[in-house]
Each structure stands twice: as C-alpha cells, then as structure tokens.
Image (spheres, coloured by chain):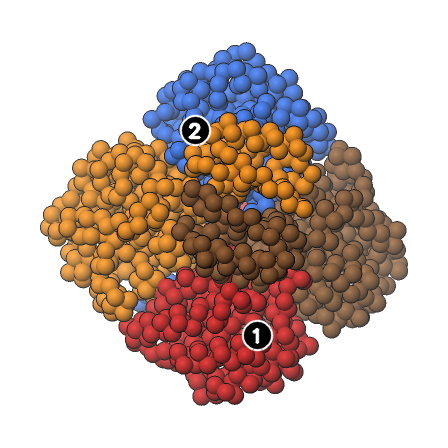
Chain colours: A blue, B orange, C red, D brown
C-alpha cells in the first residue's frame, strides 16, 4: 500500500483524475479528507507500480508527495526469505556461524609475490584469497592490472594453498574469462550501479560479492542486489567498504551500522572490508574487530608481504605478521559474540 | 614537485631509505629539517609518479603524509591548453559565447511523442534534442529504454527538426550502434568511473558529455575526462547535475560553484543539468537561470509534452509552454552576462 | 494528518493499543488493512503532537514507521502567511523587488580600516555595512573580535556613511549591548541550533539574519526561524552560506537551490552569502550573480581594502575595485530577472 | 613547518613579498624552485601563525595554496602528552582499562521514573547516571526539560544509587547551577562549536564530555577540546555520537573509525554513544559491542523503563531488560580485547 499526499487546495477534479489513474492500473483508492490535507491510500499490489509510474503520479496536478510503504526490492528482502542465505563456496560457508576471512593483495602483481602472500594468509587462517587482475583506477596513467595473466596466477596460488579465489569484474565482456578462474566474483563500489554488469553476473552461476557504492543508500544497494537476483543468481553477498562523507581523517567512513540494518532487511550475508573503509593499515585491526562484534558474516582484508612495494593501495595493506596477530584477536572477539573465525 | 611529511621521530635510516627510493625513480630529494617535523621536497617530473607509487611512499616507515602539488590530470588542465575548447557539433558550437540548450524527454518512449516534443523544443529555441534509448534505472523492474528502436526514433526526430542528438551509453558493447545515431554521446553520473566505458568512448570520434558522479569530487571528475582524452578524444564536455548531500528537499544538490571552479581548472566546456539537479520541475527555471549567470556554456533540460505520462522522471520535466517561457527568460539572463542563448 | 505504518504481522492488540493512545490525545484513527501492511491514518490536529509523542509512537510495539504530513513549523510557513514578508530597516526593504547588498569586512579590526571600507562599499552601492565584533573562531588562539569596541567603530562608520549595520551575536549575555548598536542581528551558522540564543533574539525588537547551519536541512533551518518567531519577533531573514559536503574544491557547497525551495515553503526573505559559500574571492562574483538569478532577496559579501592584511577570512574578501565591478554586473543580472539592486 | 605553494608563473616580486611577510613574523623562508612550481617552506614556530594570518598568506598575490604541517591543537595532542589521560570521577576512572557505562533516560521527566531507571541501570552494572534537565530540541513547541528541578531529581537518584551524574549544559548562564549538581558536564553535538560555552566550562573544575558535532571533522572536534583545555580544564572526554551523511536508514552514521583515529591523535578518553548514533533501540546493542571492540574507553546509552512513554527519544531507548542483557554481552566483548566493563 502506498500513500499519495495532496496539496492543500487540491480540487475535486484533480482527486478524481488521480483515482481514475489508479483504477486504470487495477488499484483501489481510499480517499481520506483531513482538515488540512487530503490523502489517498492506494490499495492493491502496488509493488507492480514502477518508478516511472510513481514519477507520473508525483507529476500529476494537486499532488504534493508520494510515500511508498512497500520496499522496492523483493527477492533480497527478509520478508521473501526468513532464513539467512548461506553460500557454500568449495565447502566454506558464508552466512553461517563461522566468519571466513578473505585476504590477499589489492592487485595481483606477479606470481612470486602472490604465492608468498597466499601461503602467509593461508597459514594465518584466511579462508579465501583475494586479488585484483582488473583494477579500477582513478587515473588512466596508473597500473590497470595484469588481466588474464593475473587470473592465471590466482589460479596457481589457489591450487597451491587450497584457498578459493575472489576477484573483481569491471566489464561485462570479461565475464567468461573471469568465471573460468574465480570462485566469487566481486563487483566494486564504482560499479554498484553499473546495471548492465549486474545483469550479466546475474546470469552467471557464481556467487557474487557486491560492494556498496561510495554514496549509495542501503536501499539502492539492495536494489542492485535485486538486479543480480532478478536474473536467477541468488548467491549474493553485500560488502560494506565505507561511504563518502565530509571527514578526511579516514579514506572513507566505514558504516558499521549497515551490518545490523542489513541483517534486519535482508537474508543475504554481510561482509565488511575494513581496509578500504579506513585506508590506513594501522586502523584496520580495530575496525575488523568492531565489524565482527557488529555481526559481520565475513571480512575481506588487504595483506601484502611488502606494502611499501605494492602496486596499489599499499598504505592500507597489513603485513603478514600483523595479519596473523589480527586473526588471533578476531578469534577472541568472534568467540565473545558466539561465533568462530 | 611533491612533499613528503615525516612523522615526529622519523629516523635517519628511514629518511635515507625514502631518499634512495626517490632517486631510484629519477627524482631528487630536498630534505628540510624543522624543529618539529622533517619534510622532503621531491624535485623532478613527479607527474610520472603513479598513484600506486604514491601509496607505496605513504606506506613507508616514518612517513606521515604525502602532499601532491601537481594536478594528476594533464590533457584536461588549463595549463595544458590556455584557450577554451570549443566543440563544433553540426555547426553549433559548445564552449563559445553562445549557450546552446539541449532539451527533450528523459527517455524515448515512442515516435509520436518524441517527434512532438522535438518540434516543440526546436521552436522554443533548443539547439539539441536529448532523449535516452538505454536507461540506467535503480530497479530491474522499471522500463529500461527502447534500445536501438529508440535511437531510430531519435534519428527520425532529428531529421525532421534539424536538431542534433545527444543520448546516453551504458555498456561498451553498445558503442557501435550508438555512434551510428548520436551526435553527442552522454556518460551518465553512475558511469562516471566506469573506466572501461570511458576508454571505449575515448577511442570513438564523437563528442562526449561526461556527467559528474553523485559523490565525485571535481578532481575525480577531471580524471575521468582525462581517461577519455588519454585515448585521443579531446571533445569532452563536463556536465554538473547535482551531488548527493544530506539535504532531501531536492533530489540532489546542484553544485553551481563547480562552474567557475572548472573554468579555472580546465579548458573544457561546462554544461549544467538543472532537471536532475533539483528533481522538481518548478525549481528548474530558477536554477537554469542561475547556471547561466554562473557561467555555464550549455544547459540540458528535460521537457515532456505530458510529464504525467512520462515513463521516466516525469516529476522533473517541464511542459513545452514552461520551457518556451524559460527560454525567453534565459535570453535575458544570458544577455546580462554578455552571452546569448 | 499523519500516517502510522505497521510492521508486517502487527497484532490486533498492538493496533488497539495505538488507536487508544491516539484517542487519548483527541485524535481519530483510520485503520486501513492492506494485503501486505496495515496503516493508520491519524485524523485531527496532529500539529499538536510533539516530537516526543511522535517518538513514543515510533517506539510502540508493532510500529514500523511514522510519516508526518504536516510541516512542523507554522509561523514561518507560506501557509501561515501567503504574502512575502518585507523587513524595513531604516528605510531599506529586504524582501521586496529591490535586492540590497550588505558588504564589509569579516571582522572589525580598527576604526580607520573599517571606515575606509564602509565608504568604499557605500559608494559602490551597498545598502548595509557588515562586520563582526564578536567572532566565532575554530581555534582558541585566533583573534576573537574587538567586542564592544568593534561595535562602537561600526556605529561611527554607520554614522559617517548612513549605512545601517549588521553584526553577529554569539552569546545571549551580549544581547543588550549588541541591540544598542546593530540594525540587524546575525546568528552565525554554528549557532543555528543554539536554541537559547534563538529564544533570546526572539524577544529582541530587531530584525534577525539567521544563517543556515553547515549540515542543517532546510526543514531544521525553518524550525530555528520558528524558535525566534515563537517569541514574537517575526522579522527573520534566512541566509544560505554553503553546506558541508565531500567536495573540497570550495570551502563549502553553496546550495543555491535552497533559494527557490524556501520561496515555496516560507514567506521570509532569503539572503545569500557567496563569500562563505565558496571561500575564495575569485569565485564570489559568479556565485553572487547566480544567487540573484536564482531569486535571492539580498546578498551579503565580504569586502576588504587589503584582503592580505585582513585578520579573518582574507582569502574570500573582495577588494573594493572588484566589488564595484561586481555591483555593476549585479545590476544587469537583477534587471534581467525584473529586479533592481 | 608549513608549506606555501605558489601559482605557476608567480613573479619574483610576489615571492619576495611573501618572504618579507614571513620574516616580519620571525619565520624563515626556504624557497625551492621546481620545474613546474615554486614552493616556500616556512621554518620556525609556525604554531604561532593564527588562522587569520594563514588566510592572509592565502590571499597574497601568487599563492596557490598553503599546507599546514603542524596540528593546530596542542594541549589535546598526543605529542603534548604521551600517556592516556585518565579522568577520575568519584572513584570511577575513564580512560583506563575498565570501560564504564553511562546509562539513563534522554530527558529527566519526573522523580519516580528517574529513580526507577537509576536503580535498574545500577543493578545492571552502569557506572554513571545520564539524564538531561536542559534539552536542546529542534522544535520550540517540544518539551525543553525540567531545568533545575530535573537536576534535583538527578541528585536524589544519585544519592540513592551512588551513581555519579552526567548532564548537559546549553547556556553559559546555567553553569553555576549545573556545576552544583553534575559530576560530568556534557556539551551536546549542536553546541560543539558554541565557543563561549566551551570557554565557560573550561574555567569550571568539572570533567567535560564533549560530543562531536553532526558535521564536525575530527580536527575541528579536537580544536573544540583545545578551547576547553586552553582555559585550564584538562579533564575532557570526546564522545562520538554519529555524523550526518546521506544515509537515512539510521538517524546518523556512527563513525566508529573515529575511535582508533582519536587514540592516535590525542591522549583524551574516547566515549561512544550508540543510542544517538543509530536512533533505533534494536541497533544499539550491536553498535555498543562494536564500539568496545574498536577501543572505546566508555559508553553512554539511553535506557528507559517505558520507552513508549518517554518524553524524548523514546525510539532509541533500551528497556532495562535489554540493557541488562547488553551489559552481559559487553563484558564478554570487553574481555576479548583485554578490558573489563
């Protein structure tokens, strides 16, 4: 049910016009005349009313505002599915009581470094290897990733360590090649509303990690998950990685309250990326612990054997020894909230 | 020249290490020891220092922060080209003393409506016909545009009225077909950092209108223009269309100060879209006039013969009679700042 | 009329409980049971429902959200008063067809400089002299203003030039002294929600210029105007001076769309301060012109004979010759929208 | 040391002029001429350069920007005091290894309710009683607090339970009366830059809890702490309570990364207020746990025996049973990071 608030002084003809419009869409109108405002309650399956029809009603003469009561997403909503979605990737479950940690370098640089990092994070207890072969970079003059070569290195590191792989897609034309190598496909923050890309991964048979856009509301984020799910791929996890605010002390503002909010609104697993959230390695550990305490289902953390030589985001990468220490601390925090790493 | 600020207590060894790193990149280091901080001035062509190298320096032991003095974009900068870039599209110049207005519906819905709108905006004095055939929509259940059919309708309306066409691209795979029909290719706000798409239109031989991302800084926006230009396409115009802030009285916050800021930083033409900026038709006229007074080189405005029946963004579309009145008002404002519509 | 949206699965008992609560406040409840949600329309004078009662309803079992239809401000609303409020200060009207310009230094520094500036802005056509005697400064170690001495200099400069004075109040304890000297009392952005100060100036018999808070919504701003008006002082003008966003190219983001939005919501005059809005003197002129084109009723602009020696905000002050040129340009823009300076 | 970046093409005369200015302030200038830019390193005690002098340099001909290297706050900085400040309030230490919890209603409503709540939070393990006698409210028509009567009720509840009191000050004229009753004086978010109020509490001999402003940067927040400390009162604690962003799913966005950032920048204790941060009681518990995991030194939480009847902020208040459960959970999380509640 939706509500249409009319302007003070809306005429009877304007009201009739709107009621007729609604009836033409198989909806019933419940007109309530108050002392200061008249409102129209819209009864029926208003979820079929599209954004453009809503816009049209908003543009009608006499209308002040339209309040939508129903959520615009369905498949992603907690109402649609009461139980938490658990995504099983080669035996590791995301969305259950265990909290898997995805770790690795921001970008794949070469085979030797990648394998070294993979072995380190594996031995520290990571459950997935992360690493970008296709990198979205602000500058056209920056390193853009190794492409398929990088995917091959990831596959080799995965074979050596047994860690499944998560890697980012930037272009629908890369889907086929990425699907061949990746265990989880990542959609980056800048592509959260790249709707063509969402539809494309929606038709893939691989779990998707959908990062929140820099200035996306939680509702828009769930709508983007809905895009993927509407194509049949229901294995979507949502990754909070910081939003853009006025504060510049951190690279972004990690919105940890998104974790419990999402747990109420959706059945999909919630992942937190403290590395991009704060952008400085020495702030990663406290925020990773806070994410676990807030109820995150998984973490994704940047680790590099030599952050200073990293070709991307070195400043926010943990060294393996720091990562190992963090994993121990995370085990304690997870236990304190009844979960395990 | 860039500046590296060291932490209080940075050791001599840490300083030597950084200096050596810089020299390895053919840069000279000028170490200044203050009473409270030591800073290193980096001398040489630091524009070649990539983001990742900068990150690496930031991650080095002893470093507190790195201040980049030079702008990270070149081709787009006013330093690179002192004179304003003028883009000539079928005889109409964008970036000169005349301020062309691009007008039309948000989405192309059908041939009859589109032609009717095209004729109306033409007679009111518009210089371009706008209309989306591929529409980025928040919901997967909303109208996504007519695709190539929509492009054909645009072409027919263009032929009838003589108005050149501007239309949006969402997917690199659509470039070939869009290039056949469009006179200006539009990159929407949500794709401002869809770097693959930027590179793709960078290799096209068509002018590009690049909308500002919802939460993009002016610097990031210019970097995205640089992406396009780096591929050889220098006919880029920048379109302010509102940024996301905490204020909800308007759909977005139209940042008109971006107009004079851009006129200082870049030689590229600056366009303003008041329709998306405010999201309500009755606020469009004052903001269009303000944009002209602030120095905009062109405007892009949504017009629909029947906003209430529009399939997209009806609420923010002007009716032709309002548009006609606005065009007259704009002529006065333009004249008052020494320009013409 | 307000609307209470219930959670899916709200029980009949919960509904009865809410209905009873409303009836206890002399309101009638109109319960509509939809297929997915039940909503309660609240009929009666809901403007008497305070924030805390609204909170209480929100906290009641079974409630998902409360939608308030009526505006929380009354005296400030356009519904309360259809005609524009015109404020007459010593013969100069703010809110009429003329657009007065208030100009002067950020802070009053000494008598000689102030008088020199006052004479310059007077001869360029300014209608008011601005200048701070009490200065809100981010740092306790910065110049905090001359206090009453500064007020005396303002009074002398006013006597010489005939320009009425606008100056800022920071502390309720300073009201008596400021009222003796000032013609308009300014409430700065940082004090927009200093409610005690608002009540205090509400009981003064002087016009008040209320600056928008850095992160205040237009609604909150109007509520602060309501605070002043609720004490009997209806001569309030609203001054847009830029809001805080993620963009750092300008000091703040001047939200010019607030001008037409306010003209719809309120009868109070709207003033624009482009100097604080952008923070750089060479961006002031285009934004001042844009403000006039957008419908501003007055402008307030910083002018200093020697910006480089100014004790506060030098960077954003115009030199008298630039101000004179701007005034001429503003006359043209004002004429183009049917007004005068 | 600070850095002045000159515009491309700055003249020798402009450079000489700036150098002379600096020398007049007993500073030395180190001019470095790069290929694209000249920069001036400022050597000497630049902490004495005030904001207004910095502005003046920015306004000087030839200057592009000024980069300040030194932090503008001193007494509040970690450099000034290496060890954490511990504030002892009637035997309870804030800033030590124990994490005290301050709990109670948003506003003091009457003696019976307050005492009931005080007893409940005491028995659950709270260390302080919070409650507002002077309430900042958006609307002039809302309950503004009981004033001194409320303070007396707080004192009685304190006597009964042994819990020290924290309560808010809004007006410098209330200082004397508040000091008589309160153990900690709270400065609310809206008054974070009410500089007169800061100076006033700076001369009191009571610990101060300084809430972060809705849109205040961490740097501005520390400057406000510096205001208080500059008057001799060094017992200041900083309370994160959510910042304003575009997201509307929560009342504010709780910026937990501020906790580790502050622990690096300052020696002052850091408190977190999850109730105002999220604004919904069912999100308070996860965020309280996250705050502890992130390193908070204390928490402040709203508790009400009957949230639905609360006269202020009912929606975000925990019921005593929920609070009791939360306290148990917090004990576990605190232990997992080596601390106690």
Residue A60 shows up from this direction: no
Q: Residue furthest left?
A: B160
Residue D267 shows up from this direction: yes
- Horizontal arrangement in the rendering, residue C94 relative to residue A90 (left or right): left
- Give coordinates of residue C252: x percent, y percent: 49, 58
Q: Secondary structure at mark 2?
A: loop
Q: Quick check: B141 above or below A340?
A: below
Observer-nearest residue: C84 or D236? D236
Q: Residues within 10 Å of mark 1 (few under 14, many from 20)?
A: many
Q: Quick check: C320 above or below A309?
A: below
The residue shown at (55%, 60%) is: D21
- Mark 1 falls within which chain? C
- Mark 2 falls within which chain? A
Residue A42 placement: quadrant? bottom left
Observer-nearest residue: D117 or D85? D85
- Give coordinates of residue C158: x percent, y percent: 52, 85
The residue shown at (37%, 80%) is: C98
- Horizontal arrangement in the rendering, residue C150 relative to residue D75 (left or right): left
Q: CA distance from mark 1 to mark 2?
A: 53 Å
Q: Quick check: A315 above or below A53?
A: above
Q: According to the image, label 1 marks what residue?
A: C108
Q: Secondary structure at mark 1?
A: loop
Q: Which mark is residue A143?
A: 2
- Looking at the rendered image, the disc whose residue lies closer to the viewer, 1 or 2, is 1
Q: Which quadrant of the figure contains the C terminus of chain C?
A: bottom left
- Give coordinates of residue A83: x percent, y percent: 57, 32
Residue D329 placement: quadrant? top right
Q: Quick check: C319 above or below A190?
A: below
Q: Which mark is residue C251?
A: none
């Amino acid at each position: 049910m939706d509500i249409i608030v009319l302007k003070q002084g809306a005429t009877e003809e304007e009201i009739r016009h709107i009621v007729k419009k609604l009836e033409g869409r198989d909806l019933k109108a419940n007109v309530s005349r108050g002392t200061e405002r008249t409102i129209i309650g819209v009864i029926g399956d208003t979820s079929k009313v599209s954004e453009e029809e809503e816009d049209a009603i908003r543009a009608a003469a006499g209308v002040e505002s339209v309040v939508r009561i129903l959520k615009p997403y369905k498949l992603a909503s907690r109402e649609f599915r009461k139980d938490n979605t658990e995504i099983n990737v080669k035996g590791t479950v995301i969305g259950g009581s265990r909290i898997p940690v995805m770790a690795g370098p921001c970008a794949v640089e070469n085979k030797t470094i990648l394998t070294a990092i993979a072995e380190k994070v594996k031995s520290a207890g990571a459950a997935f290897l992360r690493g970008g072969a296709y990198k979205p970079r602000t500058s056209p003059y920056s390193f853009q990733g190794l492409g398929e070569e990088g995917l091959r290195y990831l596959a080799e590191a995965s074979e050596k360590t047994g860690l499944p792989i998560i890697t980012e897609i930037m272009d629908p034309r890369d889907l086929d090649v990425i699907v061949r190598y990746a265990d989880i496909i990542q959609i980056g923050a800048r592509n959260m509303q790249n709707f063509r890309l969402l539809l494309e991964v929606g038709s893939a048979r691989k779990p998707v990690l959908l990062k929140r856009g820099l200035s996306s509301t939680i509702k828009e984020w769930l709508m983007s998950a809905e895009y993927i799910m509407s194509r049949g791929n229901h294995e979507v996890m949502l990754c909070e990685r910081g939003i853009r605010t006025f504060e510049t002390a951190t690279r972004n503002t990690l919105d940890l309250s998104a974790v419990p909010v999402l747990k109420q609104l959706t059945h999909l697993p919630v992942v937190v990326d403290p590395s991009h959230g704060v952008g400085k390695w020495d702030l990663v550990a406290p925020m990773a612990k806070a994410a676990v305490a807030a109820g995150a289902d998984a973490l994704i953390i940047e680790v590099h054997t030599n952050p200073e030589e990293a070709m991307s985001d070195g400043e926010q990468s943990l060294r393996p020894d720091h990562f190992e220490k963090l994993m121990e601390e995370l085990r304690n925090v997870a236990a304190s909230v009844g979960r395990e790493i």
